[in-house]
Amino acid sequence: MNFSEVFKQSNQLCKVSPDGIYLATCVQYRLVVRDVNTLQILQLYTCLDQISHMEWSSDSQFILCAMYKRGLVQVWSIDQPDWHCKIDEGSIGLVASRWSPDGRHILNTTEFHLRITVWSLCTKAVSYIKNPKACFKGIDFSRDGCYMALAERRDCKDYVCVFVCDDWHLLRHFETETQDLAGLQWSPNGCVLAVWDSCLEYKVLLYSLDGRLLSTYSAYEWLLGVKCVAWSPSSQFLAIGSFDEKVRVLNHITWKKIAQFEHPATINNSKVVVYREVEKKSAPGNEELSLDNITLGSPVLSSHSKYEIHPTPVQLPVVRPDPDRANPKIDNMASVIWVWDVQKMSLEAVLEQTSPVRCFQWDPRCSRLAICTGNTKVYLWTPAGCLSVQVPGDGGFQVQSLTWHCHGDPLILLGKEELCLCYTNTDTEDK
Amino acid sequence: MPESSSDVKDLCSSSGKCQTWPLTGHLDHSPLPLHTKSYMLTNFCTEHNVPECVTHINQEVFSLGLPPVWTQTDSTSDMNVVSVLNCMYELLQLHRRGIQTLEKMEMDQLKWSNNVDSLQLSCTQLKEQLELSKRENMGVVERERQLQLKVKTMQNCLKNEKEETHKLQNIVSSRASQYNHEMKRKERELNKLKERLNQLLVDKKDKRLAIDISNKLGRADGKRSLWKTEKTEAKHEGEMYKSLLRDYESRQGQLLLENAELRKVLKQMKKDMVAILSSKRSIVKGDKQDHSAMEVDSDEEEEVIYSCQESADLFIVHSQEKLTNSVRRQWRRLKNYVERLDNQDDIKDADAVPRETSKEMGKMRQEKKQCKDSIEKQQHLLQKVSTQCDKETSDTTADDSHLLQEKDRLLDEWKSLEDQRKSFERERKNFTEAAIRQSQERKTFEEDRAMWLKHQFLNLSPFADTKTPQRSKSQCSFQMLGETQPIRASLPEKPIVTSPTPGYRPSVSPSTPDLLHTLSLICENSSSKPKRNEDAGDASFLAAQQKWWISGDNHSGLMLTREDCGSI
């Protein structure tokens, strides 16, 4: 495994372009664009204020830089460095800013979620969308970029608006049977919209593209409900994680539960491979790490004292399941990652880290999971085995988050103020 | 009678010791037992008071209902003894009866007293029991009372709890509705505020709200943007429905494929099951055949339907149902069959296994026989081939094989020749032994003859001395013979004579001419004798011997050749 040199970044803003050629990072108020392979600086842009949010357009031609404090959005072009664009929301403030799927419109969410302003870079036209809902995930674009679903709250009722991203024509507008809509997500094939209620009530509604209610799913009542929802990339399954420490998987034909994954404190299944991170201190000042495989059935893990129960705040709902895998993270067992096999609908592996997991992400190309726990190591899991790598760094590179390159190979590790690329071409996985 | 009693008392007092007499109807508390027979004789009657006593006794007897003892009408003052005795007897009877009744009464009294005692005992026991049960009853009653109290308290508690839960539920629901109302109210307020804020901001006409772009960009897809019209809206709708339909169609296609696959698998399974069932079943059941025929027909139908792709959904559904039903039927039959097989195996385990094993054994034996036959045949063939090879010397394709055959042939010849030699050796041995025996016999015969002749000569002719030197010669020869004979005789003892070593041959051969010579001499000598039979025999013997020796020489020549052969 090779590591690149460490670069500076701020605000955890480091994104690879959708075509995989460029790597954009923000350092305070500067935007640095590098080539992914050579890491040479290709472009350098200066914004007016500290950049709060940065996003590539879908055609990898433009980068959006939002400065929430100032209420400004600046757009930069890769091809034409002289081209500039600045959007000022004024006193109405700016809370969120994003690209539209076609890469020519910018949607700004104003303060207090008063409205969403749609700026067109083609026509300089402005559109407004009123009453957007301020919830966890109130906007979602379909994967093909044709439609946008927006949650709206009007007169104490929840509505869903479906827009055609072409000309922002309101295609459908329907009320949902939720008490307090918490989020919505398109299925990867763009035909079904999953809508879920807030955690006070367990309710997941499935709407067709044309606004018909296909099905309602509610596992139980009177307890805290849905925490996170994820579609399988083939749109065949919908995984619902809830506060009762269970994940329920629905199928796309009947929208009924086909599997339920539990996360008990003691695992007695002998087919599960459990990896436990063990730290060894061989020499003073040097921390070495080794991973032990522990197959189960032994009473070692049956005692509760082995797990540290961390009542951490809700973190990182990165659940992007592979076609074969689903992996939820549970807050009270925040240092444990559970990997489930969706083909067999059973638990595949459990990874127990020494510190709470901060971020994990699947490799877009293969079944490989990268994990970071806030220390100087990055962990990789594959069905073949588990690996932990020390990130080389002078002052100790604390890996706070990570992202994969869209083609899978370099893994981008983000520390507090620095970033580093990890090349896994020549990785040797050993058990 | 008081008077009588007083009289008696008077009488008694006058006498001294007196005994109170038990009187009828007058029971005294006499301390004395009543039935004691030891009466004390009292002086009731003396010589002076006889008439008074008589009258008294008369009175007593009369009171008892008995005839009087003495009547005054009697002439004499003497008592009538008979009446007195009768009276006494009657009195005794009365006494006895009285005693009997007394005894009875005593017995009765004892019985009654016993009864009374037992009854008293039982009475006390029962009283005690009664006391106990009374106490228990009291205890039980007490407990019941306490339990009832408890029950009452529990019921009260339950009631209270129920009321509480009702209250709480009411509270909760009321609070929920309250909160909902409040939330809605607050939301409305918020909306109002938002609108107000919006209005204010919009009204302010903030100039800073602007976009500053150096130049407009083209559309991402390069097309020109269209006006928003109904057409476009309809187009959007149409596109949306198209995408939905596409998705449904793809899903349906996948499901159809899956369905077809599963149906194929089912058909295959059914075929296999039918095949298994029909092959295993020994009894051919007409029903099953009909069924299978029916199923085959239905299958054909299905296939026809499927291939034709008729759009009538009912038809396809119906055939699908048929297929599943037929598969289920077959599966049930197979299950029953397997269960029956299991049962049969359990029952006929002992029989089946040895039968099978015996069958297997028979098969194996047959196979063994076949193998053996084939092996024998092959052996015969090989032998034939090998003999043919020996015969066919000219028929050789390769030099190596020819040489090998030659070698084999020669080896065989060698073997045969060795055998022949051995046999010859044996014969020779026999012949030598025979010759030795013959010679020994001859010698003995000659000796006898010589002795006889000698005797004859000595006895008959005066020319005994002249013949003696001849005789001495002959004697000498005979002696020589004798010498040689014993040597000859001893020779057979030596094993060297019979050994077929070629080295010995030359050593033996010189001695044999001597023998021949001596034998011929003897024959010459003997020829002069009148015994011609012997001569003929001897000559023939000699000739035979000569022949034999020649053959022996030949044999030795053969031996030499054998040796030559062997040296190759």
Image (cartoon, coloured by chain):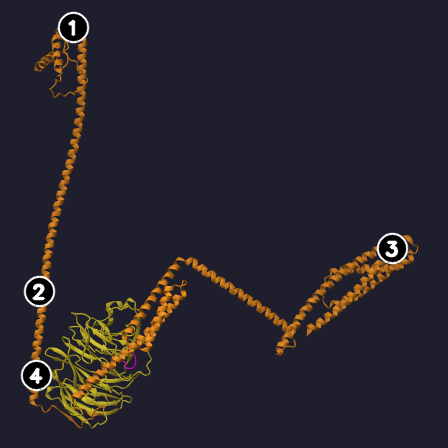
Residue in view at x 43 percent, y 58 percent: B351
Dots 3, 2 in contact, CB < 8 A = no
Q: Position of residue B433 (x, y in %)?
A: 75, 60
Report which colour depicts chain A.
yellow
Q: Check residue B195 in the rendering and tell me which mark sits there, or answer none.
A: 4
Split into 4 quadrants, where in the image is the N terminus of chain A? bottom left
Q: Which amino acid is tagged 3? A: Leu
Q: Which residues are magenta?
A: A362-367
Provide the residue designation for mark 2: B167
- Which of A234/B103 is in front? A234
Q: Main secondary structure of the magenta part?
A: loop
Quick one: which chain is orange?
B
Q: Residues within 10 Å of mark 1 (few under 14, many from 20)?
A: few
Residue shown at the point (79%, 64%) measured from the top left: B545
Answer yes or no: do the residues labelled 1 and 2 have beta carbons within 8 Å? no
Q: How far apart, in angstroms, are the residues tagged by discs 1 and 2?
A: 130 Å
Q: Which residue in the structure is indicated by mark 1?
A: B78
Residue type beneath disc 2: Lys
* Secondary element type, mark 1: loop
Q: Are marks 4 and 2 in contact (CB under 8 Å)?
A: no
Q: Position of residue A415 (x, y in %)?
A: 23, 82
| In the image: residue A429, left or right of residue B356 | left
Q: Position of residue B316 (x, y in %)?
A: 29, 74
| Closer mark to the observer between disc 4 and disc 3 | 4
Q: Earlier in the sequence, mark 4 or mark 2?
A: 2
Quarter-of-image position of residue A51 = bottom left
Where residue B48 sits, quadrant-wise, is top left
Nearer the camera: disc 3 or disc 2: 2
From the image, tell me which residue sits under label 3: B453
Distance, label 4 to label 2, CA atoms, is 41 Å
Q: Is residue B405 visible?
A: yes
